Image: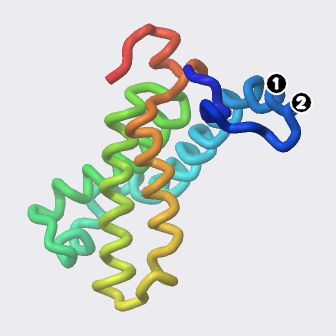
Amino acid sequence: MSDPVAKGTRLFVPALSGLYSGLHNFAETVLRVIAGAALVTHGLGKIGDPFGSAGMVESLGFYPGAFWSLMLSLTEFVGGIFIAIGFLTRPASLAATFVLLVTVWFHWITAGQGYSGAEKSILWAAIFFFFAIRGGNSHSVDAKIGRAF
């Protein structure tokens, strides 16, 4: 892991360098755990009826609806757990990014709500994209088992 302060950047308060370095992984872990837990919470209602969103996903053009409804349920619930604990972080985060980009499309284009309707989905997609690229960091199951995508 590289130094969190970009090379060549001079801090206005140099004494904060140690604080930033010391909390870098912790802050990233907090974001990953909260994002994963939020995804689990969102998927909690879907996992009880994993085929219940079939009509909704078909209305968005995803056929067969039963398959994509199940994938949506698993991505949100199981994928959220995986992201929170940092297990298979990159593939779970990539799947979550895809789901969130579909919701951006839905709110912005299909529902005609524009940016204001899609804003939360854009932010969540960016968070999950970050973890799809970055991985789980040293405070993750991936790191503990010494394997990651």
Q: Measure the C-alpha gap from mark 1 to mark 2.
A: 7 Å
Q: Which residue is located at x 64 percent, y 33 percent?
A: 8
Percent coordinates x, y for residue 38 in the rendering:
57, 52
On the question of residue 29 being in view, the answer is no
Q: Mark 2 points at which residue?
A: 15
Whether the residues at callouts 1 and 2 have beta carbons within 8 Å, the answer is yes
> In this view of the protein, which residue sits in the foreground, 85 or 124?
124
Residue 82 falls in image quadrant: top left
Q: Which colour scheme is used?
A: rainbow
Element at label 1: helix
Q: Which residue is located at x 16 percent, y 64 percent?
A: 65
Q: Mark 1 points at which residue?
A: 18
Q: Is residue 120 left or right of residue 47?
A: right
On the question of residue 136 being in view, the answer is yes
Q: Is residue 1 above or below residue 119?
A: above
Q: Residue 87 carries which label?
A: none
